[in-house]
Amino acid sequence: MSKGAGTVLVTGGAGYVGSALVPRLLKEGYKVKVLDLYIFGDNVLESVKGNPNLQEIKGDLRDQALLKEILPGCDSVIHLACISNDPCFELNPELSKSINYDAFRPLVEISKQSGVRRFIYASTSSVYGVSEAENVTEDHPLLPITDYNKYKGMCEPVLFEHQSADFTTVAIRPATVCGYAPRQRLDLTVNILTNHAINNGKITIFGGEQMRPNIHIEDMVDLYVMLLTIDSGRIAGKSFNAGYENHKVRELAEIVQQVMAQKMPEKGELLVEKVPSEDIRSYRICSDKIKQELGFTPKRTIEDAVNDLIDAFKANKLPDSMSDVRYFNIKAMQQVQLK
């Protein structure tokens, strides 16, 4: 597919990553269809509203009649939509399974039947569960400890069943995403720490020795854009980890502390308080494969993500950041009572 020549359906395009990705795709010259329930507000894509190459569809991924209506004419699908993270999934496990897993096969099959030529699936690096391995590569066994991770992983073989010469499939297992986006999440580690540093002048970390891989949201956008045009033979039927660096939660807090001292010295010394935690989730991922096979290397650091967030706070782009439900997936889910 030549650059800018195609039409892309982005499921979940009004979510955290989607809100950064969709404007970028339009800038690159793509026609974009967004399918989303708009749980986090109808104005997430305000900056590109009215763009003639953008079609926003407020609808449910599980609606197969709708999929059959909107998929014809699409060259690619970037599938971001899901009930994201463990707490949201556990809020209503049956509902979550219906969206994250049961709806997946029909989406893939209708995409293929409709003439889509490339399907990019956002899986998650948490499919590996808890691991002490130094290098968790794509060959590491999938040992999910929650249903959210289990069903994310179970979608990958379903996708690869449909791999063919005219239907290229690829799964990306991203690290935890961080940084600023128009639909901001403040329930992810780096973003949580920065929000609390700005508003409380103190960071509380639970445990602190757990390992967490992270990646800047703009690097994820770069990767999805690249996957639309890269030679299909290099990605067909493959899974790739996508992360920047593995850090202990304590180290992430120290990064926030350092950036705050540089950017907002008027706030004074930022206190970091450690409290015991029963959260055993600790994992690191190795992203050598995507570098070696696709030439993809993240360009932005955790410091960059914290800088971007602080700039957004200073510009008043994140009002009521400690209380507004739109920044917190589980609170937004509780409010809309999705069925």
Image (cartoon, grey):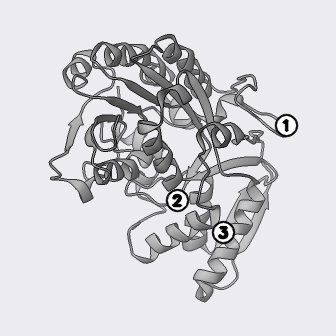
Q: Nearer the viewer, residue 288 or 317?
A: 288
Mark 1 — residue? Answer: 132
Badge 1 element = loop
From the viewer's perspective, tell me whether residue 253 is left or right of residue 167.
right
Q: Residue drawn 71% across and 41% down?
A: 288
Q: Nearer the viewer, residue 125 or 130?
A: 125
Residue 121: x %, y % from top left: 48, 29
Image quarter hosting the C terminus: top left
The three-letter code of the residue at mark 1 reads: Glu
Toward which corner of the image does residue 324 lie, by quadrant?
Answer: bottom left
Q: How packed is label 2: few (under 14 Cα within 10 Å), some, or many (20 or more)?
A: many
Q: Residue drawn 36% across and 23% down?
A: 117
Examine the rendered structure and indicate whether residue 191 appears above or below residue 260.
Answer: above
Q: Nearer the viewer, residue 251 or 199?
A: 251
Q: Which mark, residue 256?
A: 3
Find the distance from the CA under tag 3 to the CA under tag 1: 25 Å
Q: Residue drawn 45% across and 77% down?
A: 314
Badge 3 element = helix
Residue 88: x %, y % from top left: 51, 35
Badge 2 element = loop
State which tag comes first along the sequence, 2 or 1.
1
Mark 2 — residue? Answer: 179
